[in-house]
Amino acid sequence: MPTDKSQDKLDEILGQVLRTHSEPVPTDFTALVIKEIEQARQQEILEQVVLQERLTLAGCITFGLAVIVAALVFPARIVAVFQSYTESLTEQFSSLLGEIPQAVETVSTDWQFYTILALVLLFTIGSLVELFVDDSLRVA
Amino acid sequence: MVNKVWKKHYKDKWLQLLRSGDHKAFAEFIDKYKETVFLCCRTLGLRKDEVEDVASETFLAAYKGLSRYTGRAQLSTWLWSIAYRQGVNYLRKNRKQQQFKSELNEQIADSKQQLPPEVMQSKETEQLVWEAVNRLPRIWALTVILYYREGKSTADIAKVMQARENTIKTYLFRARQKLKQLLAVTFGEDADADR
């Protein structure tokens, strides 16, 4: 640190002068940087979307290839898996068909209650449709 | 006391907004520090068109790095270090190696001589001081600006310039000597008159 008087004075002058200095900056600089940041962010989002799409496509291709390879290498096992799926689906469908007469019977027994329920449901759906159709008409 | 607490609360809130990527808060941040960043780039010897590019690169880097800002250093010191790094990297990329090394150590104008008396008489104190600072080697000029304008300690300047504190003290000492020599006609006489 300076010890003599002239050095003290120099320090004082430097402090005063340099602190009051105002550096010229283009007036639209802030807006330009914010715009650049926004563009960079959009670019980043776009890159992410492209990457996701590429990954999905790669996944689809890999899965397809894996299925083909599996069908070629283990045909018996693949057939067995598909058979078990179709069997379980058929079982579920036939049990559903079997339950229909029972449901008809229940509704016919308490038909007043089910009629009111159906009317309330219809009214709700009607109101919702009216709301959305009206909104879309207003927007158009 | 209340004012101090309020200021701290406001600063914390602002930092939180900055870290979250709020554009309004970041625009405030740019407005607050743009002059400083421009000054850093200009002092490093970048041309006018280069200064704007490097300054916007600095703010972009700051925007990306804000989430990692821990608050250990002052925000201005942290930004200065980014600006300094960006400026030096730009010079390194765009100037030849030899030219880059000499550029950082050379003065913006010839500093071997005192400012001519006619220049000294015709200008205001502020212009004279800036002219003298611009005649220092760029690294010295930057040290002087950080110390006297920004009020940074030599330890903080060492962090910004990634140098040892003793090196910064040497720069500062030599810069003072040179400025004293350059401004001797004006301030030296005043100082003598004070004695």
Image (cartoon, helix red, strand yellow):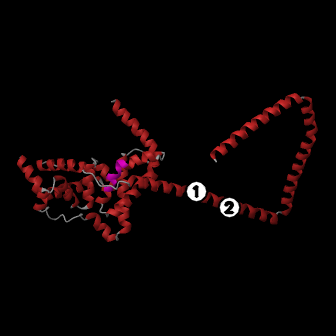
Label at residue B35: none
In the visual, does A125 lie left or right of B53?
Answer: right
Looking at the rendering, the stretch of residues picked out in magenta corresponds to B31-38
Label 1: which secondary element: helix
Q: Identify the residue at horizontal 31%, vertical 70% (top origin).
A: B99
The residue lying toward the viewer, choosing from B172 and B37, is B37
The residue lying toward the viewer, choosing from A95 and B97, is A95
Q: Are marks 2 and 1 on the same chain?
A: yes
At which x and y percent is residue A23?
Answer: 28, 54
How many residues crowd around disc 2 within 10 Å: few (fewer than 14), some, or many (20 or more)?
few
Earlier residue among tags 2 and 1? 1
At which x and y percent is residue B44?
Answer: 30, 60
User: What's the amino acid at mark 2?
Assistant: Leu
Label at residue A57: 2
User: What's the amino acid at mark 1?
Assistant: Gln
Q: Are marks 2 and 1 in contact (CB under 8 Å)?
A: no
Q: Is residue B102 above or below residue A128?
A: below
Q: Identify the residue at horizontal 32%, vertical 58% (top origin).
A: B41
Chain holding disc 1: A
At which x and y percent is residue B175?
Answer: 20, 57
The residue that label 1 is drawn on is A48
